Image (cartoon, rainbow, N blue to C red):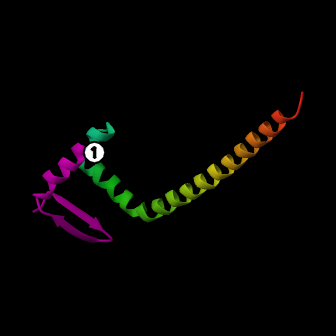
Amino acid sequence: MPRLTITLDGQTAGLPDAVVPALQRLTDRTNAAQKTALTVLEWLTTHLKEVAIADDLTAAIEQLRRQHETDAQANLESSAKAARDELIAALDPP
């Protein structure tokens, strides 16, 4: 009997024992990188949630990128207009 059994919608599947050490290595790597102390089960749950939201997250990041570009362009245009106005004003005698 495998050590890792998953039940979803009343169906159960077992993963081979050899999967557990591999998942432990991934968990350890994540814990080291993120300074966390997740168990394999916690890591697996988190990872599956990340997989579930991946498409929505990609869309959200793209929207944030576009908004950032729009904001940056507006800021550049505003700054350029202010610099232009200052340079023109500097040409007029005091």
**Which segment is the magenta one?**
1-29
Percent of width and height locating residue 4: 18, 58
Percent of width and height locating residue 78: 73, 46
Residue depicted at 81% across the width and 40% down the height: 88
Q: Is residue 92 visible?
A: yes
Residue depicted at 34% across the width and 52% down the height: 46
Most foreground residue, 33 or 13: 33
In screen coordinates, is 54 left or right of 35? right
How many tags in the picture?
1
The residue that disc 1 covers is 30
Q: Amino acid under label 1?
A: Thr
Residue depicted at 22% across the width and 43% down the height: 28
In screen coordinates, is 40 left or right of 21? right
Percent of width and height locating residue 12: 23, 69
Q: Above or below — where is 64 with respect to 78?
A: below
Residues packed near mark 1 inside 10 Å, few (<14), some (14 to 19) or many (20 plus): some
Quadrant of res 10: bottom left
Q: Is residue 52 magenta?
A: no
In screen coordinates, is 19 left or right of 64? left
Q: Above or below — where is 35 with respect to 14?
A: above
